[in-house]
């Protein structure tokens, strides 16, 4: 059973043969593009730490969604930057907030696009934390009530999927119950189930203007060292009614993606976060990496680890590359 009988190189001889034995594929069906929506009209601000990513007002977001649809990408996930922030993040759960308005506009102009809304308070609170502050820390249960109201505001506006990213305990349960009470029992929840307290979120906080004004998120987001705990978080969210679960970030947590997929077999999303994107962009801008190849290799590795869906700022570039462009 040894060399020279086995020669794995036989199946690597040419691209046709390699295509035939390729185990994992990336398809445009698996891509989700994150979008940052800001107040105003005709607003288009590039995020300096994320070249190619822009904050767009609702009119331009709708235009972007039409392009996304034309590229064959099935879904976007929306993050909102409100007109004004306050300690309670009140615009987050207002029916007239930036996200409900954006959802209505997208669903009326580009109805085919699946609109996922990020459900969290950090973009809306003046302190930048993901919930209400009591005695210097985020209070869990009162925050869950506000998150349920936020999810409802998104649902009433026509969101197709809600995605809580706050990491409060019991929030999937709270959101599911609120949705069901108002007749949204068929609205799926994509839970950011295993979300780690990661330094890879840095550039996102510029884009979403959501940097915590004191402290950090370690009392609610997970410790990077913990894989078993990630499985328990996923299990709890599924028991509370999550339809799909997310692991975030992606590349530094491929083992977690793998274990979640193997253990539960449910639809798993992975978020290739802002820092993962920014690193590739920065190295490519310096001529140190081949951007397109590294993009495809990292996305494929996330698929190989077991992710069914990938949230990525590269979604449009990847869709073009997959179409042969
Ligand atoms: C909101 C949220 C964050 C991200 C997605 N939703 C930031 C955070 O937790 O600070 C990060 C996404 C990225 O880095 O691309 N809670």
Image (cartoon, grey):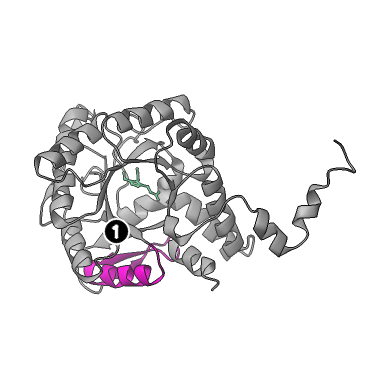
Q: Residue 217 in the image: x percent, y percent?
A: 34, 35
Asked if residue 106 is positioned above or below residue 209 in the image, the reply reads below
Q: On the rendered structure, is 288 left or right of 165? A: right
Which residue bears the numbered disc 1? Answer: 114
Reply yes or no: does residue 282 show up in magenta.
no
* Residue for point 11% across, 45% down: 183
Q: Residue 11 in the image: x percent, y percent?
A: 76, 54
Asked if residue 17 is positioned above or below residue 145 in the image, the reply reads below
* Residue for point 47% across, 65% down: 319
Tell me where the magenta segment starts and ends, as one range. 44-73
Snapshot quadrant of residue 5: top right
Residue 4, can we see it? yes
SS at badge 1: strand
* Nearer-the-camera pick, 110 or 193: 110
Q: Residue 32 in the image: x percent, y percent?
A: 39, 56
Residue 312, can we see it? no
* Nearer-the-camera pick, 147 or 235: 235
Reply yes or no: does residue 71 show up in magenta.
yes
Asked if residue 166 is positioned above or below residue 104 in the image, the reply reads above
Asked if residue 86 is positioned above or below residue 196 in the image, the reply reads below
């Amino acid at each position: 059973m040894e060399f020279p009988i086995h020669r794995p190189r036989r199946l690597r001889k040419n691209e046709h043969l390699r295509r035939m034995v390729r185990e994992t594929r990336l398809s445009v069906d698996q891509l989700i593009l994150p979008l940052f929506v800001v107040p105003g009209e005709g607003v288009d601000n590039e995020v300096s730490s994320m070249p190619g990513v822009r904050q767009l007002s609702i009119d331009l977001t709708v235009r972007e969604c039409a392009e996304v649809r034309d590229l064959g990408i099935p879904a976007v996930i929306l993050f909102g930057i409100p007109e004004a922030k306050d300690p309670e993040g009140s615009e987050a759960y207002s029916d007239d907030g930036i996200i409900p308005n954006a959802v209505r506009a997208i669903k009326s102009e580009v109805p085919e696009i699946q609109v996922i809304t990020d459900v969290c308070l950090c973009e809306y609170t003046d302190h930048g934390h993901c919930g209400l502050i009591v005695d210097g820390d985020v209070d869990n249960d009162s925050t869950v009530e506000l998150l349920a109201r936020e999810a409802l505001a998104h649902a009433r506006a026509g969101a197709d999927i809600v995605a809580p990213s706050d990491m409060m305990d019991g929030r999937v349960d709270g959101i599911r119950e609120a949705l069901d009470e108002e007749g949204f029992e068929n609205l799926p929840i994509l839970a950011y189930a295993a979300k780690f307290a990661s330094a890879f979120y840095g550039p996102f906080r510029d884009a979403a203007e959501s940097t915590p004004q004191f402290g950090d998120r370690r009392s609610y987001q997970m410790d990077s060292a913990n894989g078993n705990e990630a499985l328990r978080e996923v299990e709890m969210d599924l028991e509370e009614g999550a339809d799909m679960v997310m692991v975030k970030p992606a590349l530094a947590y491929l083992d977690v993606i793998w274990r979640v997929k193997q253990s539960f077999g449910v639809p798993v999303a992975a978020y290739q976060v802002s820092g993962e994107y920014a690193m590739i962009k920065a190295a490519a801008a310096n001529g140190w990496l081949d951007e397109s190849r590294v993009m495809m290799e990292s996305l494929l590795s996330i698929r190989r680890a077991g992710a069914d869906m990938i949230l990525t700022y590269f979604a449009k570039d990847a869709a073009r590359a997959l179409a042969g462009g």
